Amino acid sequence: MSDSSIQVAAVVISVAAFAFSTTAAFWALVCNRSQARAVAQADALTEKAQREQAEPYVIVDIRPRIPGSSLLVLLIENIGQTLARNVRIG
């Protein structure tokens, strides 16, 4: 082989290596972005679940005062983990 054919082969190998590394870097970036989106969605869901868990949950129910009785009782109850404020019946 002559020096010029060796140089051409080296250039071809260099270009192929550059193309391969550029393609690999591109796909790594694409995967990173999709993983970052998945992490952001998981964080948002976790934050929403924590926020909902900390909220008061007020329920209203009408029950008989004594089972079988026709006398009804209006029951307003907070089943959440935090204090319910400014509850209004209207």
Image: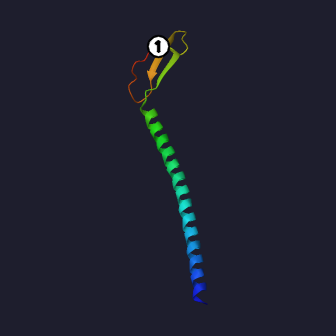
Furthest toward the top, the residue is: 71
User: Which is nearer the eye, 66 or 58?
Assistant: 58
User: Which is nearer the eye, 40 or 20?
Assistant: 20
Neighbor class of circle 1 (other Cα within 10 Å; few <14, some 14-19, many 20+) is: few
Quarter-of-image position of residue 4: bottom right
Say if residue 65 shows up in the picture: no
Residue at the location (41% across, 32% down)? 54
Circle 1 residue = 89
Report x, y in % for residue 77. 45, 21
Taking the image as shown, residue 86 lies to the left or right of residue 17, namely left
Furthest toward the bottom, the residue is: 1
User: Which is nearer the eye, 25 or 89?
Assistant: 25
Residue at the location (47% across, 37% down)? 48
**Label 1 SS:** loop
Quarter-of-image position of residue 87: top left
Taking the image as shown, residue 2 lies to the left or right of residue 90, namely right
Quarter-of-image position of residue 17: bottom right
Say what amino acid the circle numbered 1 marks. Answer: Ile
Residue at the location (53% across, 60% down)? 28
User: Which is nearer the eye, 26 or 2?
Assistant: 2
* 50 over 32 or under it: above or below: above
